[in-house]
Amino acid sequence: MKTAIIAEKPSVAREIAAIVGATAKKDGYIQGNGYIVTWAFGHLVGLAMPDEYGFTGFSRERLPIMPEQFILRPRQVKGEKGYAPDAGALKQLNIIKEVFDKCDKIIVATDAGREGELIFRYIYDYLKCSKPFDRLWISSLTDKAIREGLQNLKEGKNYDNLFYAAKARSEADWLVGINASQALSIVAGRGTFSLGRVQTPTLAMICKRYWEYKNFVPVPYWQVRLQTEHSSSHIIVVLMMIFTRPDDLNPV
């Protein structure tokens, strides 16, 4: 009987493999002692782009784009001819499928959180896997934490609601990003522009700081030095006082 363990990234997989006694390093996984430890590279699977739902090009009349059912696809990268599957993601997905096929059950060791749950569930669904799985729920990668976590595995179904929340966030991001980006590009009339729930406010913060830097106006300030005598020693006390205008410096 073999058990597959899937981590979110190679470094975590190596830590877990060392604890379970898996030492034979292969291409995309580590095996030994009845375990096969493999890993993702973050989000290997995501939601398909609009073309796969039959929405090609940008059209005002077609907005908003709201697929009846979302399609899962390997991670996409943008090239000269549009989006295409990431070769590295495809390779690792094939390795994960082989690992799952060889094993009787799965231990999910992706990060203990919403996105970690989504990463595994999207891979699991995309590969059409039906093997039973338990959850390793730990917040530390110390040897002690990993061992205790493996001794107290949780049923995978206990985290169904966490997955549903992550799935809802993923689909909402798709709807906002795709429709807002196409709407902006259509209104602008030239070029392709991108809007998103995270990238847009982050970009706004960066731009705000940039313009604060560009529009900075130097303000004069003065240094006030006080010298006092105590016993035979001289104590120098330096005070930095900043005034916004020269007339703020009033005599006491």
Image (cartoon, rainbow, N blue to C red):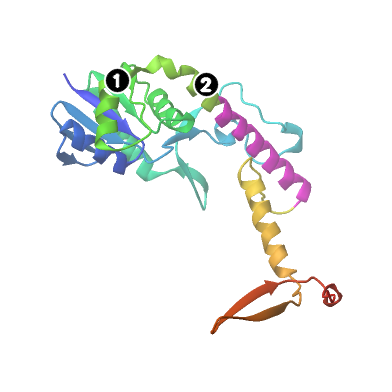
Residue at 61% from the left image edge and 47% from the top image edge: 199
Q: Position of residue 172 (x, y in %)?
A: 62, 30
Give me the C-alpha separation between circle 2 and circle 1. Answer: 24 Å
Query: Is there any visible trace of residue 28 in the rendered image?
Result: no
Foreground of the two, 232 or 220: 232
Task: Check disc 2: other Cα within 10 Å, few if <14, some if 14-19, many if 20+.
Answer: some
Closer to the chain start, of discs 2 and 1, is 1
**What residue appears at the point 50 percent right and 18 percent down from the top-left corner?**
161
Task: Work out whether residue 85 or residue 26 is closer to the camera in this orientation and state it.
Answer: 26
Q: Secondary structure at mark 2?
A: helix
Please give left or right for residue 223 compared with residue 136 in the image.
Answer: right
Residue kind at label 2, given as amino acid type? Tyr
* Residue 57 in the image: above or below residue 239: above
Q: Quadrant of residue 93?
A: top left
Residue 27: x, y in percent? 22, 42
Whether 101 is drawn above or below 244: the answer is above
Of residues 248 and 192, the one drawn nearer to the viewer in this rendering: 248
Identify the secondary structure beneath mark 1.
loop
Instruction: State the residue position of label 2.
Output: 164
What residue span does the magenta drawing correspond to?
Answer: 168-189
Residue at the image position 68 percent from the left and 36 percent from the top = 179
Discs 2, 1 touching: Cβ within 8 Å: no
> Which residue is at 35% across, 44% downward?
88
Quadrant for residue 175, please give it: top right
Q: In the picture, which quadrant includes the N terminus?
A: top left
Question: How many residues crowd mark 1 within 10 Å: few (<14), some (14–19), many (20+)?
Answer: some
Q: Position of residue 92 (x, y in %)?
A: 32, 38
Does 224 sit left or right of 103 as displayed?
right
- Please state which amino acid type lies under the numbered disc 1: Asn
- Location of mark 1 (residue): 152
